[in-house]
């Protein structure tokens, strides 16, 4: 009997859970403390970034880095660009904070930002902020995106929740913009049950994110920042314990989860290798189907995305054979009810193709070559290939 092929499986192993239980039962503090600091230091070092801030989800990571830029006064306007092919919590913080947000169509290779459409939006819209998504682990065309954003004075943020371990020109995705976000939900590359991280090289941004993560107080800040705030506002040491300098959140995670994250981080390089291997097997086995491509090297593939003419039939067939699949993330954000209610429809032809025809197949480090080959064979039994029409474009 063949085993099911899930989108994620044993992201957290039994030995990791046993170690975590032993650590917890030893009487260690469970709320945010030393394990969180160690996890942040180790993750920043692995990323090649100066700073990391651990939070309770990847969605909160996006919320935090966007609001911190606003609170710092870094934004010349309240206008932003987000990808049409992304995720609800990539876009919703911009809407919640009052940004006039425009969606950029995807290109037909990376499924990241379409460069022609991006430049047209920057020229017309004059945004302060761009948040991009590395779809299913594939790198956007970052060199050209940086050129466009430098030309128009746009700050770049990276939602890298699907790209942990992927690199572009020798630097990990998430480290190319002003800040980058990651998710450690169970179905992602590594898991802290729930959890997320922001990385940045910007010290001022890092300091304000530390405060915003914990209600807006100063106790997590560097001593000189804390002293500057207490002096500016004439706050004594006792009153400072419960003084809030910013309209902060409570986005903290726990030391319990940070402890788990530290153990997960040790296997992340091997996870990247396995995900790249599986992607290559899918690509070689599905040559007649659309294949997503980018300059990510290595590619820490989140899942294998493609296009099919008969998506619902494929879904039902795979489900009957105990193989999970999903739409190719959100498809087109502009066709979701939350966006339509606030903004109405948008003309995004490439994203529409992804919305109507996109599907992704499982890829994680616990799949072996036999699992991938079975997924390929089962998919091919009913799937009808289709490509982007020539008329689609940014």
Image (tube, rainbow, N blue to C red):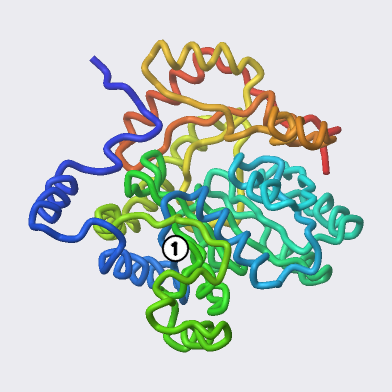
Residue drawn at the location 51% of the way across and 69% of the way down: 244
| Above/below status of 298 relative to 365 | below
| Above/below status of 184 relative to 37 | above
Q: In x, y percent, where is residue 52?
A: 44, 68
Quarter of the figure with residue 265: bottom left
Mark 1 surroundings within 10 Å by alpha-carbon count, few (fewer than 14), some (14 through 19), many (20 or more): some
Quarter of the figure with residue 382: top right
Quarter of the figure with residue 169: bottom right
Q: Which residue is mark 1?
A: 214
Outermost residue, right side:
124
Residue drawn at the location 15% of the way across and 60% of the way down: 28
Q: How many numbered discs sit on the rendered protein?
A: 1
Name the residue nearer the viewer: 154 or 138: 154
* Left or right relative to 251: residue 338: right
Name the residue nearer the viewer: 272 or 117: 117
Q: In x, y percent, where is residue 54?
A: 41, 61
Residue drawn at the location 43% of the way across and 15% of the way down: 319
| Above/below status of 308 relative to 42 | above
Q: In x, y percent, where is residue 278?
A: 41, 40
Q: Quadrant of the C terminus?
A: top right
Residue drawn at the location 63% of the way across and 15% of the way down: 310
- Describe the element under mark 1 as helix, strand or loop: loop
* Left or right relative to 229: residue 148: right
């Amino acid at each position: 009997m063949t085993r099911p092929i899930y989108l994620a499986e044993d992201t957290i192993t039994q030995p990791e859970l046993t170690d975590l239980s032993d650590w917890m039962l030893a009487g260690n503090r469970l709320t945010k403390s030393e394990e969180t600091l160690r996890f942040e230091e180790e993750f920043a070092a692995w990323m090649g970034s100066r700073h990391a801030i651990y939070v309770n989800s990847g969605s909160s990571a996006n919320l935090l880095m966007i609001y911190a830029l606003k609170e710092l006064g870094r934004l010349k306007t309240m206008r932003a660009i987000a990808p049409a092919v992304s995720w609800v919590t990539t876009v919703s913080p911009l809407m919640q904070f009052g940004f006039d947000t425009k969606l950029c169509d995807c290109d037909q290779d990376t499924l990241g930002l379409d460069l022609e459409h991006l430049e047209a939006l920057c020229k017309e819209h004059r945004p302060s902020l761009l948040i991009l998504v590395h779809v299913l682990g594939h790198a956007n065309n970052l060199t050209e995106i940086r050129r466009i954003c430098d030309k128009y004075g746009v700050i770049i943020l990276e939602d890298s929740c699907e790209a942990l371990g992927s690199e572009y020109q020798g630097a990990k995705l998430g480290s190319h913009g002003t800040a980058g976000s990651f998710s450690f939900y169970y179905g992602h590359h590594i898991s802290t049950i729930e959890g997320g991280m922001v990385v940045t090289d910007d010290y001022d941004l890092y300091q304000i994110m530390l405060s915003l993560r914990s209600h807006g107080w100063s106790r997590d800040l560097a001593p000189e920042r804390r002293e500057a705030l207490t002096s500016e506002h004439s706050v004594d040491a006792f009153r400072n314990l419960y003084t809030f300098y910013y309209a902060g959140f409570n986005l903290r995670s726990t030391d319990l989860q940070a402890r788990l994250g530290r153990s997960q981080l040790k296997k992340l390089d091997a996870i990247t290798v396995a995900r790249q291997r599986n992607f290559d097997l899918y690509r070689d086995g599905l040559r007649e189907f659309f294949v997503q491509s980018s300059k990510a090297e290595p590619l820490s593939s989140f899942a294998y995305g493609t296009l099919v003419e008969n998506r619902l039939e494929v879904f039902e067939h795979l489900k009957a054979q105990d193989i999970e699949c999903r739409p190719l993330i959100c498809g087109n954000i502009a066709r979701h009810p939350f966006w339509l209610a606030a903004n109405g429809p948008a003309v995004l032809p490439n994203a529409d193709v992804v919305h109507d025809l996109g599907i992704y197949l499982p890829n994680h480090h616990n799949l072996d070559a036999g699992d991938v080959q079975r997924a390929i064979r089962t998919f091919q039994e009913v799937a009808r290939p289709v490509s982007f029409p020539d008329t689609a474009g940014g």
